[in-house]
């Protein structure tokens, strides 16, 4: 398998958020600002990359009957590590992401990559797959976070864009606005980038 | 049978390794987190005692002993500056108009109020919420309490008088009740 195919799959053809639509809970919850989106993406990339590497390394020793519990233990270990480091060195991010950091353990995106890719491929390809899927996740949540923050708070990365008279549409900060924008984003993605890529 | 044991052993190995790695990470991040939490819990105290740089937390038994007759008090910290005791920061919880009000009360070593800070409350916006929103309310407590208690009255200009928020009698009284319990606990058990 070619590396370019892996990245094309991860970011465009099988984008975890916009095409596979998995792990939606955290996507809707944490994309209210660009900063939160970037923080969550970094955590997801770290966990995906590390768990894919470890799982593909030990894939030949894992009895298939207990592979799922072992995947979960590996994923939970990395999530806990990320959580500890974030709590120690990135406190404000840790607080604004809150419960959604430990919930990365049950994000089906990570388990899906472990099961469908890392347990069948070598270490290098699995690492690339983790990176590609993580980037696909990043592209989607940062785009969503940017639109939500600009429309909902009138700012970008915390910087005020429109001055004091701008009346922000608070609905876009709430999950309801996230649903609406996510639908529009998926629609735009499908008719433009994805269709061009598959045809 | 053999296979069951093998599966169990493999799972045990994987979880044991994972546990070991996490213990290692925890030993690196644990002290950093503990230090930061200490600074956070001290930050409210610092607003009342700006010169504080350490505090000694009383455990549950000690709090129960000191606050035997002042049951609103839930936490007591002895505030230290360069190792010297400069007063006490007590967290009190009293019933307000809408739910509990949690207030941090600073009593200096002379039994005078160093300051108060309402930490948590859910009082009516615009009325009871002025116990937080109106800085003059908390300021009116500073330096009062030498006589052992404070009473809410008008703007709170007189000796041991604090500001009475009109339209928020219940909220004012709730804060004052907690403050007076802290003053009483200091006078009866903490002053030397």
Image (cartoon, coloured by chain):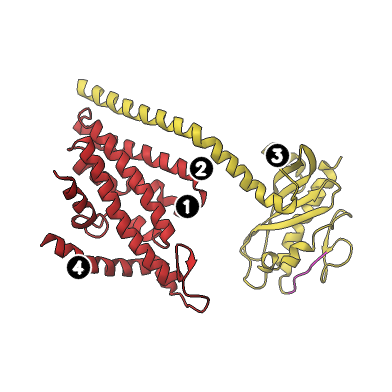
Chain colours: A red, B yellow
Kindly identify which residue carries mark 4: A192
Q: Residue at x 24, y 55 (%)?
A: A11
The C terminus of chain B is located in which quarter?
A: top right
Kindly identify which residue carries mark 3: B58
Q: Is residue B157 left or right of residue B17?
A: right
Q: Earlier in the sequence, mark 1 or mark 4?
A: 1
Kindly identify which residue carries mark 2: A88
On the image, the x and y values in percent for residue A194 come to 18, 62
Contact (Cβ within 8 Å) of mark 3 with mark 1: no
Q: Is residue B72 visible?
A: no
Mark 3, mark 4: which one is toward the viewer? 4
Q: Is residue B91 left or right of residue B181?
A: left
- Residue A183 in the image: above or below residue B180: below
Q: Earlier in the sequence, mark 2 or mark 4?
A: 2
Badge 3 local density, few (<14 within 10 Å), some, or many (20+)? Answer: some
Q: Which residues are magenta?
A: B162-166
Mark 3, mark 1: which one is toward the viewer? 1
Kindly identify which residue carries mark 1: A93
The answer to whether marks 3 and 4 sit on the same chain is: no
Q: Residue at x 63, y 66 (%)?
A: B123
Q: Residue at x 21, y 57 (%)?
A: A12
The N terminus of chain B is located in which quarter?
A: top left
Contact (Cβ within 8 Å) of mark 2 with mark 4: no
Name the subunit of mark 4.
A
Provide the secondary structure element on which disc 3 rests.
loop
Contact (Cβ within 8 Å) of mark 2 with mark 1: no
Along the line of sight, which residue is nearer the eye, A31 or B154?
A31
Number of callouts in the render? Answer: 4
């Amino acid at each position: 398998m070619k590396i370019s195919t892996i990245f094309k799959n991860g970011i465009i053809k099988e984008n975890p958020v916009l095409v596979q639509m998995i792990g939606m809970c955290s996507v809707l919850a944490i994309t209210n600002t660009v900063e939160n989106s970037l923080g969550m993406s970094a955590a997801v990339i770290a966990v995906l990359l590390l768990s894919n590497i470890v799982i593909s390394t030990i894939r030949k020793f894992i009895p298939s009957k207990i592979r799922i519990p072992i995947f979960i233990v590996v994923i939970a270990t990395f999530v806990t590590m990320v959580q500890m480091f974030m709590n120690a060195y990135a406190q404000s991010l840790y607080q604004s992401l809150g419960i959604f950091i430990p919930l990365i353990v049950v994000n089906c995106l990570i388990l899906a990559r472990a099961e469908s890719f890392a347990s069948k491929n070598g270490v290098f390809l699995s690492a690339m797959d983790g990176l590609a899927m993580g980037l696909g996740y990043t592209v989607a949540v940062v785009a969503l976070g940017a639109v939500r923050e600009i429309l909902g708070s009138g700012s970008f990365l915390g910087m005020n864009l429109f001055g004091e008279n701008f009346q922000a549409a608070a609905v876009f900060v709430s999950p309801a606005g996230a649903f609406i924008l996510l639908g529009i984003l998926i629609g735009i993605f499908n008719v433009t980038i994805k269709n061009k890529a598959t045809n | 049978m053999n296979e069951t044991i093998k599966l169990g052993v493999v799972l045990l190995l994987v979880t044991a390794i994972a546990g070991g790695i996490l213990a290692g990470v925890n030993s690196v991040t644990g002290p950093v987190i503990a230090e930061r939490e200490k600074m956070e819990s001290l930050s409210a105290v610092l607003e009342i005692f700006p010169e504080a740089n350490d505090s000694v937390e009383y455990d549950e038994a000690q709090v129960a002993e000191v606050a035997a007759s002042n049951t609103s008090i839930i936490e007591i910290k002895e505030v230290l500056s360069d190792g010297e005791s400069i007063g006490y920061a007590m967290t009190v919880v009293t019933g307000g108009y809408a739910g509990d009000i949690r207030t941090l009360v600073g009593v200096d070593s002379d039994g005078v109020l160093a300051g108060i800070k309402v930490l948590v409350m859910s009082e009516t916006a615009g009325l009871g919420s002025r116990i937080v929103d109106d800085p003059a309310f908390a300021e009116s407590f500073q330096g009062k309490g030498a006589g052992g208690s404070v009473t809410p009255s008008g703007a709170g200009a007189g000796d041991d008088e604090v500001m009475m928020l009109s339209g928020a009698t219940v909220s004012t009284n709730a804060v004052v009740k907690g403050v007076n319990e802290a003053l009483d606990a200091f006078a009866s058990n903490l002053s030397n």
